[in-house]
Amino acid sequence: MRIRQALVALAALLSTYAIPATALDLTGTDLAIRMIEGGYILSVRAVPGIASVLLTESTEDPERQAASFALRSPVDHPLLNGEQRLLNGEVLDESGTARSIISSTVRSHDRLGEAFELFIPETVVYGYPWSREGQIDVGDGTWLSVRTFELPYGSYDGAFRDNPFRMRVALVERPPEPEPEPEPEPEPEIRERIVEPVPEDPRLDQDAVREFQRLARATDGDERYVLDADELIAAVLDPLDTAGPAAEIVLVVDTTGSMGIWVDTLQQELPAAVDLLFDRIPDLAVGITLFKDYFSVYLNRVLPFRHEAEEVREVLENVSVGGGGDIPEAVHEALYAALHGYDWETDERHIVLIGDAPPHAIPRGRITFERVVESAFEFGVRIHTILLPPDRQR
């Protein structure tokens, strides 16, 4: 029998107590950790007396005298959305920066009962330029700490306590899962697809042409090629031309440096066009997912559905382009994050990919073209693509 290998993450809490000494102490049975794409999910039992938890540095110092910083995530994740952190009595503004790994939200957990959940990326950052700063690659043997708070939002107005622990990542062998019985393929739905001829323009990246075509055609979407900024807004909203009274559309937008003129156009013209759409489609939800590439300010950011044109305008006003450098971008990762980052509810579900560069030819993680397409079918979402020439003036 062929054996395959899988990674399993374990956490061991450093505690000299068999039971909690105070309401803010944790033991090893209060933690659970699992691996996910791009990092880990750490679950912390919501024991009475704990209103929020924050991930911090750990020094192994049993007296806990050494100062430690809060750890922050340079990449976005749904668990970070909606969470706030108080510092000196005020909400810490972390927009546009790495975000504190904090939770004041209690969720259901199959083993712990009720628990806080923290997303820990593969690399976390800490500190500030005016003090000390750095990053930590999280893996086997990494020391971290869960700081528990009496009050929500990590408020230091109440009691708090550090609970250091050490990551353990073990390699285990598992027998292969049995092959499932193949299900009969459903009859394909016949619809008239829009397939535009590719313009003979040297500004279009040919690798991007091929990959954008694959994504659109594999998910029953439409492919567009826009060479003039005046044509962009119409192309973006084309999927909703025949929409009924309820629809959802998510714009997945490349925000690297070469997208300057195109992001400017979205900021200036899209809100007014969306305002008209809200009049025609009463139950319309518009989501925006921004993406760059690995080792940029962020990999992707999934911004919640908006239901008013002014909300869309406010989101776009805060978008800025920058970074990149090489040609491929984290396209597949952004699509996968968008597919899994929204609560899809209507029968009319669309993603519009807007960019000028192809995905990485060799995946840098576990997100692949195949996984994106599988997720699109799982959620019933059609992926439409708009390929643009890069803005070389920036």
Image (cartoon, rainbow, N blue to C red):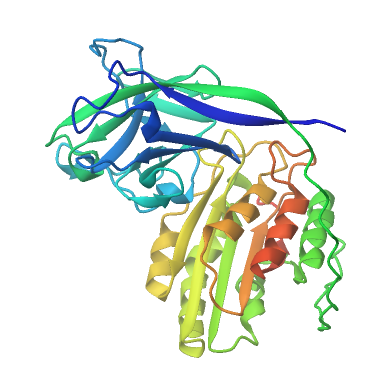
Q: Is residue 347 above or below residue 250?
A: below
Residue 20, how many percent across, how many down? 24, 27
Left or right for 379, reference 76: right
Extreme residue toward the left, this view: 157
Extreme residue toward the front, this view: 18
In which quadrant of the rendered view does residue 143 lie?
top left
In which quadrant of the rendered view does residue 261 lie?
bottom right
Can see residue 127?
Answer: no
- Quadrant for the N terminus, please: top right
Residue 40, how many percent across, how many down? 52, 36
In percent of the image, x 32 and y 50: which residue is there? 105
Q: Is residue 113 above or below residue 220?
A: above
In percent of the image, x 57 and y 71: which residue is there? 249
Q: Is residue 303 above or below residue 234?
A: above
Can see residue 137?
Answer: yes
Left or right for 175, reference 307: right
In percent of the image, x 31 and y 24: which residue is there? 163
Residue 171, how many percent across, how many down? 66, 24
Q: Is residue 70 above or below residue 375?
A: above
- Quadrant for the C terminus, please: top right
Count of numbered marks: 0
Q: Nearer the viewer, residue 267 or 175?
A: 175
Left or right for 39, reference 159: right
Q: Nearer the viewer, residue 4 or 82?
A: 4
Residue 189, how many percent across, how many down? 81, 81
Q: Nearer the viewer, residue 101 or 34?
A: 34
In which quadrant of the rendered view does residue 4 lie?
top right
